[in-house]
DNA sequence: AGCCAGTCTCGGA
DNA sequence: TCCGAGACTGGCT
């Protein structure tokens, strides 16, 4: 089962993808990634619609710089064990706070694997809700961002994070 | 085997 | 104090 539904926000139109397990992927506006073939559009399962409500609310709340109160179930089964550990660790970062890649690495029990954490962040299918943008390099520099550094800056600004001091 | 969204160290402004 | 190059890192494809 595969459903893709749009979300219009102040930052543009995101696209959410769902499996039978929950939210699988969230696309940035302008990103036309390989959208999974969608089901017959006129028949969206009630469960997916309720998930989508949560996703929409969470996304808009996040974009307003506030912590979402309830996330939809996330289907992270596509990732490796390590990646899922990293993503879970990202979810623990409070809004408006930041961690370094090394912090996350030790949080998942692998200090020194900072570089691998970067890789896992890049593979994160659900940006914004899984706050990969809150991870900075050790010297509080920006580091990278697969969705574009511009997005990372903007997302951090929305949360009131000050960069490099 | 080769890629990185990192981090540390050291040398030169 | 502030970069830039180089060496080393760990997990992914």
Image: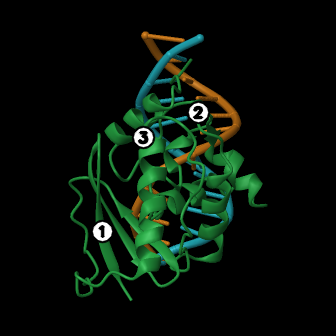
Chain colours: A green, B orange, C cyan
Instruction: Please identify the quarter of the rendering in which residue A140 is found.
Output: top right
x, y percent for residue A12: 25, 46
- The residue tagged 1 is A5
Q: Secondary structure at mark 3?
A: helix
Q: Which chain's residue wears label 2? A: A
x, y percent for residue C13: 43, 78
Q: Residue at x 31, y 54 (%)?
A: A28
Q: Secondary structure at mark 1?
A: strand
- Residue lying farthest to the front in this orientation: A46
Left or right: residue A83 compared with residue A46: right
Q: Is residue B11 above or below residue A148?
A: above
- The residue tagged 3 is A63
- The residue tagged 2 is A96
x, y percent for residue A24: 45, 73
Q: Spatial distance from mark 3 to mark 1, Cα to Cα?
A: 18 Å
Q: Secondary structure at mark 2?
A: loop
Whether label 2 touches label 1, CB < 8 Å: no
Q: Which chain's residue wears label 1? A: A
Q: Is residue A83 above or below residue C1?
A: below
**Mark 1 Cα-neighbour bin, 10 Å: few <14, some 14–19, many ≥20:** some
Nearest-to-viewer mark from 2 and 1: 1
Between A98 and A23, the residue placed more toward the observer is A23
Between B10 and A55, the residue placed more toward the observer is A55
Q: Is residue A48 above or below residue A56?
A: below
């Amino acid at each position: 089962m595969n459903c893709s539904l749009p979300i219009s926000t102040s930052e543009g139109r995101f696209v959410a993808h769902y499996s039978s397990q929950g939210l699988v992927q969230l696309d940035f506006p302008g990103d036309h990634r390989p959208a999974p073939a969608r089901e017959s559009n006129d028949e969206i399962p009630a469960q997916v619609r309720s998930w989508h409500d949560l996703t929409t609310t969470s996304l808009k709340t996040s974009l307003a710089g506030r912590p979402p109160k309830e996330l939809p179930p996330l289907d992270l089964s596509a990732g490796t064990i390590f990646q899922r550990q990293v993503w879970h660790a990202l979810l623990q970062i409070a809004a408006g706070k930041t961690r370094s890649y090394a912090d996350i690495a030790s949080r998942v029990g692998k200090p020194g694997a900072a570089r691998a954490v970067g890789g896992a962040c890049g593979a994160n299918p659900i940006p914004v809700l899984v706050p990969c943008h809150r991870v900075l390099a050790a010297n509080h520099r920006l580091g990278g961002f697969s969705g574009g550094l511009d997005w990372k800056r903007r997302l951090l600004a929305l949360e009131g994070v000050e960069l490099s001091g």
